[in-house]
Amino acid sequence: MIAGFRSQLQYIYGFRGAADLPIFERLFLGGEYTIRGFDIRTIGPKDPITGLVLGGNKSLLFNFEEQFTIAGPVRAILFYDVGQVRNVGEPFAWKEDIVQPVVPLLIDPLASVSLTPANAAPGAVPTIVIGQQNAFKSSTGVEVRFFMPVLNVPFRLIFAFNPSRAGVYDNTLQPQKAFQFRFAVGSTF
């Protein structure tokens, strides 16, 4: 029996004149190498209107696993993965707000001005808070890992349950499913 633990804190900051990090430099979680039950790059700050994950500048990740040797190169692994991603100015937290964009009931296409809340930033989409949810996204399950003798690379069959998936959409922009089955090559850590 082997027990494993990984904790990872990432922080990225642009030093040169750019106000925002480009999307290809931002941090995301999800996938077989971070939080196993979620699709790749699906955990992170989102656009309030489209729901697309835009990524953040800091992430916190914890992986726990316990390995049991079944027979020769075949192992069963019980795992628990948890993490979150935050953007500039957002601290890590236990809970996060669920926001919904405010859509006006009537729109006058000929109006030269629009009404926005007094505390809204210029150009920002006005939103309202409709509740709170768990900020840490987690996944737990069982993995069967076997080593191919010639390649010496682990092949993995992963069965995961996602207990805190609220607000996360998969790569087809559908709500993340409770149970996932995946195949991967390589190890988580």
Image (tube, helix red, strand yellow):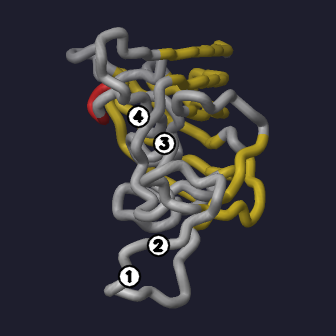
> Eyeballing the image, is 46 above or below 187?
below
Query: Which residue is label 4 attached to?
Result: 156
Quadrant in which the N terminus is drawn? top right
Kind of residue sitting beneath label 2: Ser
Q: Which disc number belongs to residue 26? A: none
Residue at the disc numbered 3 = 158
Which residue type carries mark 1? Answer: Ala
Residue at 60%, 34% (x, y): give it.
84
Gap between marks 1 and 2, in whole Å?
7 Å
Position of 32 with respect to 95 (left or right) is left
Residue shown at the point (27%, 31%) measured from the top left: 24
Inter-mark Cα distance, 4 to 2? 54 Å
Q: Can you see residue 140? A: no
- Name the residue carrying label 2: 114
Nearer the camera: disc 3 or disc 2: 2
How far is disc 3 from disc 2 in space, using C-alphas? Answer: 51 Å
* Residue type highlighted by circle 3: Ile
Q: Nearer the viewer, residue 147 or 180?
A: 180
Sequence-first tag of 4 and 2: 2
Q: How far from the left and from the top, in percent, is residue 185?
A: 32, 30
